[in-house]
Image: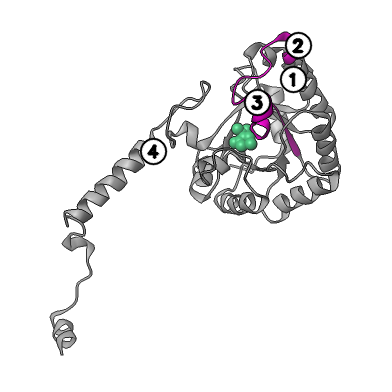
Amino acid sequence: RAPITLPGLRAMKAAGEPVVMVTAYDYPSAVAAEHAEADIVLVGDSGAMTVLGYDSTVPATLDEMLMLTRAVRRGLRTPILIGDLPFGSYEVSDEQAIETSMRFVKEGGCHGVKLERGGRTSVARARAIVDAGIPVMGHVGLTPQTATALGGYKAQGRTGAEGATIVEQAAALQDAGCFSIVLECIPSPVTEALMPRINSSVVIGIGAGPATDGQVLVFHDLLGIREGKGAKFVKRYADLQDAMDAGVRAYAEEVRSRAYPAPEHGYAMTDDEIIALKV
Ligand code: KIV
Ligand code: NA
């Protein structure tokens, strides 16, 4: 398959062909995304929780995100690669946002970056990064970096007025030049109201219903690499945490019972060499 391009993504939108996006945080998850022919791979700051074990996305640092991004880069050939700007790496000024985005491109090998929120500041930042020559993906609805202010991890825009605000935020991000916008955890009717307004940006949903141009899920959520149930919008396609637990538990039991290693796991020596060894 030929590498995906931004014009290619826009053509998919125009043709009504669903865009497949998934997160990745390391080499094996990137290889899985490549094998599935994902169109867009996001090194989400969700990695703060899924692979670094923090209890929110807020603590993720730029250096941590860049290390994950470089590992993902090595596993990918064809998808568009997007780096997720972590909390604190773009809010201070347009200059800070551009410098951070440049690091994702130059050190992380990203094609573009994503930034959260739809407020006036993030729209200005998105415009500044686009003007610096870096493609930008916006993100509205549930924005986990500001989950405290939003009242926790729950659906946004559930009243008409709040839904209209989300539609306005998405339209503003489109006007700022975002090639794509993520809608997270909003009622499907808000998405339906928004889609006719968003003609140029490729709209990717997560918990935003079926009306978007494409869908994204967190790698660890869709593969069941987590404790607990997760959000309503997640569909689990595998139970890898259970598989990992069972595999490591079986290994531990065999070490304790001395069933492992068996003779076939060891390295032999010729009789002559064994005699020499004893001298
Ligand atoms: O960090 C992340 O994984 C995200 C996606 C859910 C869009 O922002
Ligand atoms: Na994110």
Q: Which residue is mark 3?
A: 142
Identity of the residue drawn at 54% across and 50% down: 75
Q: Amino acid at mark 2?
A: Ala
In this view, the residue in front, 4 or 258, is: 258
Disc 3 to disc 1, C-alpha distance: 10 Å
Residue 152 lies in the magenta-colored region: yes
The tag earlier along the polypeptide, 3 or 1, is: 3
Q: Amino acid at mark 3?
A: Leu
The tag earlier along the polypeptide, 4 or 1, is: 1
The tag earlier along the polypeptide, 4 or 3, is: 3
- Residue 46 falls in image quadrant: top right
In this view, the residue in front, 241 or 148, is: 148
The tag earlier along the polypeptide, 2 or 3, is: 3
Is 158 left, or right, of 270 in this rendering? right
Tell me how many marks there are: 4
Q: Amino acid at mark 4?
A: Gln
Are the residues at dot 2 and dot 1 in contact (C-beta closer than 8 Å)?
no
Q: Which residue is mark 2?
A: 161
Q: Ligand 1: give its quadrant.
A: top right
> What residue range appears in magenta?
136-163
Local packing at callout 1 (Cα closer than 10 Å; few below 14, some 14-19, many 20+) is: many
The tag earlier along the polypeptide, 4 or 2, is: 2
- Residue 168 falls in image quadrant: top right
Image quarter of the N terminus:
top right
Q: Is mark 1 within 8 Å of ligand 1?
A: no
| Residue 143: % across, % down | 67, 30
Disc 2 to disc 1, C-alpha distance: 9 Å
Disc 4 to disc 1, C-alpha distance: 35 Å
Task: Examine the rendered structure and indicate whether residue 261 appears above or below residue 85.
Answer: below
| Residue 223: % across, % down | 44, 34
| Residue 138: % across, % down | 73, 32
- Secondary structure of the residue carrying numbered label 1: helix
